[in-house]
Amino acid sequence: MTMEDDPFDAFVGARYQALLRAAFLITGDVHDARDLLHDALARVYARRRSIREESATEAYVRRTMVRTHVSRWRRTRREVLTDRLPDTAGPEALHADEQLASALRALPPRQRAVVVLRYWADLPMAAVADELGCSLATAKTHLGRAMTTLRRDLAPQREVSGHG
């Protein structure tokens, strides 16, 4: 089988940009996003034969990204938070609204992951809880806290833009 015939290679070619955007929203940094995605793809590639349905591959990659990111964060327990996106943002798809990206970066990793999986990946809450490896109630608690923080942090910008 050549690389062109490999279903995993075709999957990566088709979904790379979408997965990179998800990794960016999870990490808040372009370089960390690429590292996270590549690590996740390598891990899933090594176990690709155990994935029963090809359609589940993307969910495995997202779950691996979330768990890898949370594990890294737990090991280091430090994040570098900035007020704006880096000047060299990479692919056009990564140019998110700076205020929203900044607010997302300020969230703890699990809360950020819940928001990304629920609203960006459009997963139902049960799937979000499953990907995070926690109960539905815990996932809902993380989402509620994250949304409260985001509303608080983004409210001043909405009021200012609403009067102009």
Image (spheres, grey):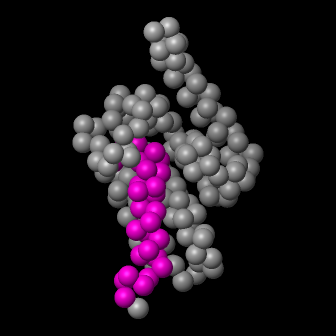
**Residue 84 in view, yes or no:** yes
Instruction: Locate residue 16: give its quadrant.
Output: bottom left
Q: Which residue is drawn at 28% across and 38% down?
A: 86
**Residue 73 in view, yes or no:** no
Instruction: Locate residue 42: give its quadrant.
Output: bottom left
| Residue 163 image point, x, y percent | 50, 8
Q: In this view, does 66 lie above or below 111?
A: below
Side (left or right) of 21 relative to 158 = left
Q: Which residue is drawn at 72% across and 53% down?
A: 126
Range covered by the magenta-colored residues: 2-30
Q: Is residue 6 magenta-colored?
A: yes
Instruction: Locate residue 140: give its quadrant.
Output: top right
Q: Residue furthest bottom?
A: 1
Q: Is residue 159 above or below residue 26?
A: above
Side (left or right) of 71 relative to 4 = right
Front residue (pair 2, 105): 2
| Residue 92 image point, x, y percent | 33, 45
Q: Which residue lies furthest to the left in this view?
A: 88
Front residue (pair 29, 87): 87
- The kind of secondary structure the magenta stretch mainly shows is helix
